[in-house]
Image (tube, rainbow, N blue to C red):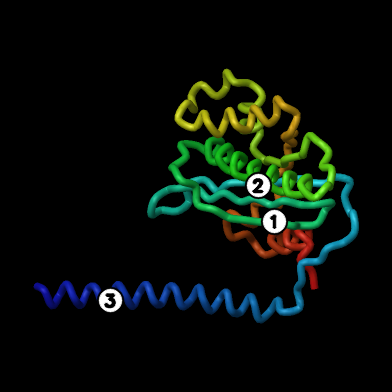
Amino acid sequence: EPFWEISEGDAADKLIFCCVWVTVKRVLRYLRGTLDYRLVYRSANSTEAVEGFADADWGNDLNDRRSVSGLIVKLYGSTVMWATRKQQSVALSTTEAELMALCQASCEVLWVANLLSSVGWRVPEPIKMYEDNQPCIAITKDPRKARRMKHIEIQHFFVRDLVDKGKLCLEYLPTEDQLADVMTKGLAAPRFQKLRAMLGVIN
C-alpha cells in the first residue's frame, strides 16, 4: 500500500508538471509572436485627466471560488496602471464580486490622482470610473439595495462615500468595451486583440 501511494503521488506530480509545461509553452509562443508590440503613449488623446476601469470574474477558480479583480487606470487616454488580484473573500454573487473590484480600483485611481496632485498637477473631479455591472452601480446610489450585502458593507460605503463627496463618478460601460475584462480571464482572440489595442499596446 505505501508503494501504491508513492506511485499515485508520482503520477499526480507528472500530471501537474505536464499541465504547467503546456501553459508555459503557450506563454512563450505568445511572447515570441508579440516581440514587436509596445505600450504606446500619445499626447492627450482623451479629455479625461484620470479615469479608471473595474471588472471582476466571479468565482471561476474551482479550488477556492474566490473571484478575480481587474483594474485599469488611464491618464489622458494612455494606460498608466493595470493589475489583476485575487479577492480576499468569496463573493456570493457577480454583483458582490464587481463591488469588491470597484472598491480596489477606486483606491488605485485615488492614489494616482493624489500622486499627481502632490507634484502640482490639478486633477479635475469627479474622476470617472467605468463599470459594466449595472446592479453594482445602483447599489452605490441607493443604500436600500445593499441591505442583503451587510458582510461587504465597508466596500459599499467606501465607494458610495467617494461618489457622494464628488470624487468619483460611476459610469456604465458595455462589457464589450470594458478594458479591465482583459485582466480577469482569458478572452477569445478577436476580443482580446480589440481590448489590447484600446489599451495602447500596438505593433
Q: Is residue 36 above or below residue 43?
A: below
Mark 2–mark 3 Cα distance, whole angstroms, equals: 43 Å
Q: Crowding near pointer 1: few (<14 within 10 Å), some, many (20+)?
A: some
Q: Residue 139, labelled with which disc?
A: none
Q: Give above or below for 118 relative to 19.
A: above
Q: Residue at x 65, y 47 (%)?
A: 108
Residue type at tag 3: Ala
Q: How many marks do you count on the picture?
A: 3
Please name whichever residue, 163 or 177, is drawn nearer the observer in this view of the structure. 163
> Which residue position holds label 2?
108
- Alpha-carbon neighbours of circle 2 within 10 Å: few (<14), some, or many (≥20)? some
Q: Characterize the local packing of mark 3: few (<14), some (14-19) or many (20 or more) Cα atoms within 10 angstroms.
A: few
Tell me what residue is drawn at x 59 percent, y 60 percent.
Answer: 186
| Quadrant holding the C terminus | bottom right
- Which amino acid type is shown beneath numbered disc 1? Met
Q: Amino acid at mark 2?
A: Glu
Which tag, 1 or 3, sits closer to the chain's start? 3
Q: Which of the two labelled residues, at mark 1 and mark 2, occupies the earlier sequence position? A: 1
Pointer 3 residue: 11
Local SS, label 3? helix
Query: Does residue 46 appear to the left or right of 175 in the view shown?
Result: right
Figure check: 101 above or below 82: above
Q: Quadrant of the N terminus?
A: bottom left
Residue 17 in which image quadrant: bottom left
- Residue 13 appears left or right of 92: left
Q: How far across and down, in percent of the image, does residue 86 sit? A: 50, 52
Q: At 80% across and 52% down in the image, what residue appears?
A: 75
Disc 1 + disc 2, Cβ < 8 Å: yes
Label number found at residue 81? 1
In percent of width and height, residue 3 lies at 13, 77
In front of the other: label 1 or label 3?
1
